[in-house]
Each structure stands twice: as C-alpha cells, then as structure tokens.
Image (spheres, rainbow, N blue to C red):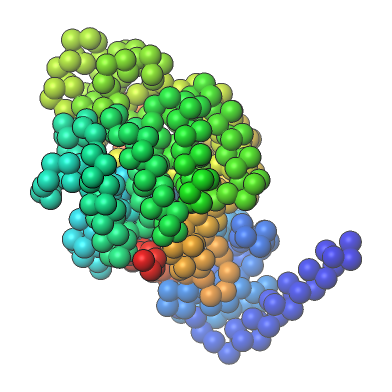
Amino acid sequence: MKIFFISLVLLLVSYNGQTQEATANTYDIVIENARVIDPETNTDEVLNVAISKDKIAAISTEKLKGTKVIDGTGKILSPGFIDLHAHGQTNKENLYQAFDGVTTALELEIGVDTLTQYYQARKGRALLNFGASACHLAYRNKTIANSDRVYKTIYEELTDSVAELALPKSKYVAVRNKLKAAIEKGAIGIGLPVGYLPNASIEEIADIYAFAGEYKVPIFSHVREGGTIAFQQAIHDAIINEAQLHLCHLPSMARKDTEFCLQSVEKAQALGNPITTELYPYTAGNTELGSAIFNEGWQERLGCTYNDLQWVETGERLTPQTFKKYRKQGGSVIVHMMKEQWVDQAISSSVTMIASDGGGYSPSGHPRSSGTFSKTIDTYVKEKKLLSIQTALRKMTLMPAKVLETVVPEMKLRGRIQKGCYADVLLFDLDNVKDNATYSSGFEKSSGMDYVIINGTILIENGNLLPETFPGKAIKSEIKL
C-alpha cells in the first residue's frame, strides 16, 4: 500500500509539474479528456495530451491550450501500432494500414535489397513510418548467380530458380559483405526467410547467425518447414551465437506444435536470451504458389490439400490441375492450414506480439493486409475476451518497439504515450473498432480510427484520410560495424 501511495504521489507531482509549464504554452494539438493508455507506465486514466511539432509535449489532468483542440471524451488515446512484418511498402497498402491504426510499417522478414533507392523513393511521400531489413535472400541468390540484377519484386526473387541452389562455403564471405553494406545504409537487421531456401545448408544459415552475433544485428526469420525442429534449430543458432532473434508468424510455422514452440520461446526469454515472436490473428497464411514452399511433399509439410489453397486472383479453391497451371504461371495463394485453437494459444501467450505479414495490394488479397490490428481488438478483446485492451495495445505498440531499440534508438520514443515521445497516436472509440476485410472481400478499410496522428501530423481526422498528407519518416538502424 505504501509503494502504491508513493507511486501515486510521484505521478501527481509529474503531472503538476507539466501543468505549470502547460499554462504558459499554446500547443499545436491538444487532445482533451481521452482515456490515455500507455503500456510502458501502465497509465490508464482520463488525461489531456498536448503535441508540439512531432513530439508529445505535455500530459496533464489540467486543461491545456492548443491551436487545434480535439475532444477525446469517451475514447481511447493509444500509441500508434507498429507492424514489424509488412511486405506492402507503398502508399497503396499504407492507406489501408492507416485505417487499421498502423503508424509504422516495416519490411523485416524478407527485407529490401536496394535500400538506397527504397529510402530515397519514399522520402517525404510516405503515409506511414517505413523501414526494412537487409534482404539475405536476395544477396545470397545474387551471390550464387554472380549477378546483382535488380528484381522487380520480392516475389520474383522467391520464385527464381537460384533459390533452389546451395551456397558454396567459399561464398559465405561475399554474402556477409553484402549484408554489411546494407546495414551501413540503415538496414534494420537481417531478414532471413530460410523457409524459402530449401537447399540452404545448416552451415550456411549458422554463418548468418554467427555474423549477427558478432555485430549485434537482429535476425528476423521465417524458419524452415519442420515445426518443432525448425524452431529448435533457429533458437539454438541464436543462443550459441548470442544473436537477437525474432521468429515470424509462429502459429503458421509451428501449427500443431504451437504450444510447444511458444514454451520454447518462453524458456529462452526466461534465461535472458533476446528471442521474440509474433502472429497474425488469422487461420490462413498467404504466399507465392511458385515458391519453394510448394515443392514436392508440400501437403505433408503444411498439413493441407489442394482445396485449402485459395487463388487470390479469382478466389477459387485449387485442384491438382489448376495447381499445376497456376504454379507455372506464378501468383499468390491464401493457404487455409491452421486451427483456431492454435491462434488462440498464440495470441494469449505473454511472449507474442501482433504483426500482419501483409502483402502488396490486390483487390482479393489476404484480409490480414488491411485488418490485422482491428481484428485483434474486435475479435480477441471484445468478442472472445482472450485479451484485455491494455494487453492488446502492448502487443501492438510497446513490444514491437522494444524489439528494435538496440539498433534503432529512436524506437525508445515510439510505442508509448509519454512526454518527449514521438506523437504517433490513435484516438478511437473501442466499441466502434472493427475489421471489415474477409477472405472473400479482400482488402477493406477497417472502421473506428477517428484520429491517426503520425509524427505530430494528423493523417486521419474524424475517420477521413486527409489529402496530400505524408507524415511518414524513415526508420533506420544506427548499427556501427
């Protein structure tokens, strides 16, 4: 009781100190009477929040002066959602993500191989904060092919036959050098999608973990097919090399072994290892039909059949005949391969965070690309009640921010609502938050985000996107090699 009283006094002193300062200032934006939820300090109370330029300038129980004043009565003010796993990296996808509450969308599982061009192309014209990892897959394949030709899309790289080849040990150094060059350009760690490299040897992948451990670079990995064994291999490589590891979309890789794999992450964390994981709140995955995922034996590995594959372009379920036709043609499929209980297990775990794995825009694309975060709230907070709103927000804000803090120091100022933090914030009525995308309707804007503010600039106001507004900034690592 004594500790609680002291904490309360300190909190009031802090607010009162800010209040004295606030009375002498007029801020750019003031949000009044909102239920402020900050997952780091466990703040959950009605407060007034002021924004100046790109930062939160004051938080107070007292009235604040603002050039623009927003009434937050009856609504939640939370940090903006941080998506560590967003393949859609143009404003077309970002628009849908913004309505889903995302303020930072990063391509970390696979990454981008042309980072200089990527950052330059989006500078000053991005709806959301953006960034990418070093694309190991492209660098190793270009090393094998002895060609640095630029691939048009990530998925062209996935389907290129060179991905089926092994990397000679003599070329390990060349791949390392390409990774170094990317990291020096601001790459946020290494994207390591081993599952798309069926003939990458254990030694080849172990060398990447050794590199990551040596230079303190995080790895974001789509593990091999194989359930428990694949996760054990990745966790083993991370621990013995003292490397930071983020395991992508755990339920879609672990499937029937979801509970065991979650326990492995829990044990690794309990021993002090920086190993984290994520999920998207859907029972279907989404990938390219031409990729190595669908090499011979895919039905046994994935635990599904032709009828479980949904061709994105038309929405049809595949047959042996159409599978062969479309695999040769190339394109995207939604893979219905998970059970609801696996997703429930994963989302209920204290070690998981939310990430969309959203792809490029397609009218009939996977609903996770536009509805992941609202679905987490609508289904798992409001309907199933597996999460409190405070826990859900932590999984979508603070937890992903903390994954990046060692290499991107500014992430210590995102995923939070505190004085001095970046003003990436959402104002919403909990009752109104709803995902509208489905497996049949494809990309649909989510409902309920009344205000989306990024770096202190309003992007969505009263549920409407403001035209010609581009508040997104580049997120880059500061790793010194």
- Quadrant in the picture for the N terminus: bottom right
The residue sitting at the front extreme is: 170
Q: Is residue 121 left or right of residue 455?
A: left
Residue 442, picture quadrant: top left
Q: Is residue 318 left or right of residue 300?
A: left
Q: Locate residue 91, reporting x and y percent.
A: 26, 54
- Quadrant in the picture for the C terminus: bottom left
Q: Which of these two is toward me, 369 or 257?
A: 257
The residue at 60%/42% (across/down) is 268
Number of numbered discs: 0
From this view, report whether residue 279 is shown above or below residue 252.
Answer: below
The residue at 42%/70% (across/down) is 456
Q: Which of these two is toward me, 222 or 4?
A: 222
Residue 301, picture quadrant: top left
Q: Which of these two is toward me, 95 or 81?
A: 81
The residue at 61%/34% (across/down) is 263
From this view, report whether residue 197 is shown above or below residue 395.
Answer: above
Q: Locate residue 160, reporting x and y percent.
A: 16, 34
The residue sitting at the bottom extreme is: 24
Viewer can see residue 257: yes
Viewer can see residue 128: no
The residue sitting at the top extreme is: 320
Q: Locate residue 304, reporting x and y percent.
A: 38, 15
Q: Locate residue 280, reporting x and y percent.
A: 45, 37
From this view, report whether residue 79 is shown above or below residue 361.
Answer: below
Q: Is residue 316 left or right of residue 302?
A: left
The residue at 27%/47% (across/down) is 172
Residue 345, picture quadrant: top right
